[in-house]
């Protein structure tokens, strides 16, 4: 039996309203979607919208794109960051609409969405 653990996440992205799993027992959000809470192991999970506000925890600047996908090769340099959402979840994402030299750990960012060849993806922009 196949279990779709990420479908709801991607459907929320398609609606431009990111939702993440939240534990009913301990109240914590988590990412990536899993069948149990990684904090308390409860399976009492539901999906809730997140604010989209966060900070850059850490980041790297990609100056040479690897792999066969040509789309990312045309975007170098670009920033891949570990973002800590105000809900306490950390997730990877690109920081866009900002010179790569201006990105810093602790920088306030907000969720946005961009259409690429592969479809709509969540990205982060400097908080305004």
Image (tube, rainbow, N blue to C red):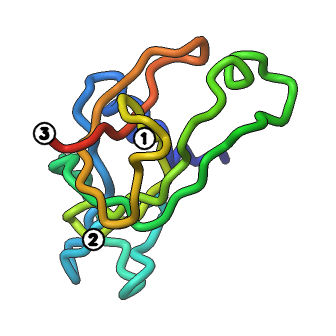
Query: What label does residue 88 carry, if any?
Result: 2
Query: Can you give x and y, in whole percent of width and height, for residue 85 in the image?
Result: 27, 60
Determine the secondary structure under disc 1: strand
- 40 lies above or below 33: below
Q: Is residue 70 above or below residue 82?
A: above
Residue labelled with disc 1: 95
Locate residue 14, reporting x and y percent.
35, 22
Give the residue drawn at x 39%, y 75%.
Answer: 37
- How crowded is the residue under tag 3: few (<14 C-alpha within 10 Å), some, or many (20+)? few
Q: Identify which residue is drawn at 86% across, 24% down.
A: 68
Left or right of residue 58, residue 122 in this image: left
Residue, disc 3: 128
Frontmost of labels 3 and 2 is 3
Indicate left or right for 11 with 62 as reference. Answer: left
Alpha carbons under labels 2 and 1: distance apart: 19 Å
Closer to viewer: mark 2 or mark 1: 1
Question: Above or below — where is 11 with respect to 57?
Answer: above
In the image, 36: left or right of 26? right
SS state under label 2 = loop
């Amino acid at each position: 039996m196949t279990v779709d653990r990420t479908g709801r996440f991607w459907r929320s992205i398609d609606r431009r309203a990111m939702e993440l799993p939240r534990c009913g027992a301990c109240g914590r959000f988590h990412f990536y979607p899993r069948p149990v809470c990684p904090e308390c192991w409860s399976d009492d999970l539901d999906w809730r919208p997140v604010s989209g506000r966060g900070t850059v925890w850490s980041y790297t600047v990609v100056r040479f794109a690897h792999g066969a996908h040509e789309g990312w090769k045309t975007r170098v340099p670009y920033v891949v960051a570990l973002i800590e959402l105000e809900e306490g979840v950390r997730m990877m994402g690109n920081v866009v609409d900002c010179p790569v030299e201006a990105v810093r750990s602790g920088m306030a960012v907000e969720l946005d969405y961009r259409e690429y060849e592969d479809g709509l993806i969540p990205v982060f922009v400097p908080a305004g």
